[in-house]
Amino acid sequence: MLLKKNIPIKYIFGKIKYEIFFVAIYGFAIEIIYKNFNITEISIPMTVPTVLGTIISLLLAFRSNQAYDRWWEARIIWGSIVNDSRSLARQVMFLIEDPYEPEQIDGFKRRFINRQIAWCFALANGLRKEDTMPEIKRLVTLEECDSLADYDNKHVGLIQLHARDLNNALKQGWVNPYQQIQLDATLTRLTDAMGRCERIKNTVFPSTYSLYIHLALNFFILLLPFGLVELFGFLMVPVLIVITACFFLIEKMAIHLQDPFENKPTDTPMLTISKNIERDLKQMMCDKQAPATVLQPEQFYVL
């Protein structure tokens, strides 16, 4: 996720440097032809590119809104994961108990909560198509790691281990049926959040819509110099670059926001959120190894 401060200009305009380069070459070519060969017939009324630019602006606005909705939905989902992870840890800490086996219960609670932390990291890395096992091995037992071998999506396997332990706790009498229902409801919400993330990840933004807007934008840029050349003369090229840069930046913004799980600076900051969850849940367990604070970002974004 991009932060409010210190976003370098190089990053912003680096996304459109090639487009701007070709637009500048094209603008210079039109300017040279118009001045040296005195071909005034190539100019067209500004009304034509103005109307086309207005239509493209509306289409880009609609696309940007749809892309932002996808990004914002992803952020809302991860906000719910934070809340449900804390709720699950609280329920495990205070609903599961057995006065006759306190040490076994304490180990059960720690294993369960550490597995929930691993689930957050596994979901984040899984959505970004990265290796999930390093974080899982850090937080769960070797036996549980081995049980995940048959799962392509490790976060699904971790939820299954949650359900297995919860069922075992009910059989052992560590929770009553009502408490088991409450814990299972929290697991259901986490499963729902997992599915919603996967839906966003696997649902491709309509390619034909993107293609048509891009073609219309290119056609608009091809026509624009012929309308500007009469109005601005030798200043036509810088004006052309400024106008086209605005359109290109809006298009690029929509392209980046529409895929919030691609390991880019514009992503939902899933790993940062997972680290916050780890800190909070370990502090709830009074774990001495819990990170006191989350490291501040050294760059202009967090992942």
Image: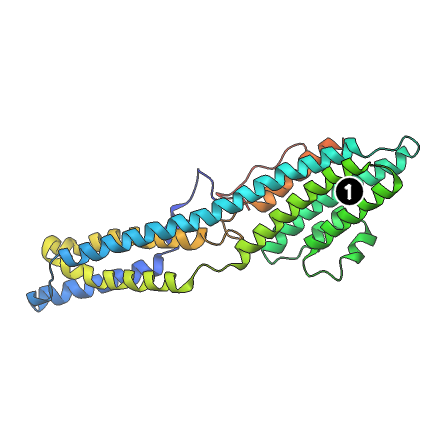
- Where does residue 177 sit, x and y in percent of width and height? 80, 38
Q: Residue at x 58, y 46 (%)?
A: 270
User: Which residue in the rendered view is the most extreme toward the right?
Assistant: 100
Q: Which residue is mark 1?
A: 112
Q: Is residue 226 left or right of residue 218?
A: left
Q: How is the image coloured?
A: rainbow
Q: Is residue 1 something one can see in this rendering? A: no
Q: Is residue 19 left or right of residue 136?
A: left
Q: Residue at x 75, y 42 (%)?
A: 114
Q: Residue at x 81, y 35 (%)?
A: 96
* Residue 241, image quadrant: bottom left
- Please name the amino acid that badge 1 sits on: Phe
Q: Residue at x 67, y 32 (%)?
A: 292
Task: Return the residue nearer the eye: 87 or 146.
Answer: 87
Badge 1: residue crowd in 10 Å (few <14, some 14–19, many ≥20):
many
Q: Is residue 121 left or right of residue 141?
A: left
- Where does residue 267 sit, x and y in percent of width and height? 51, 49
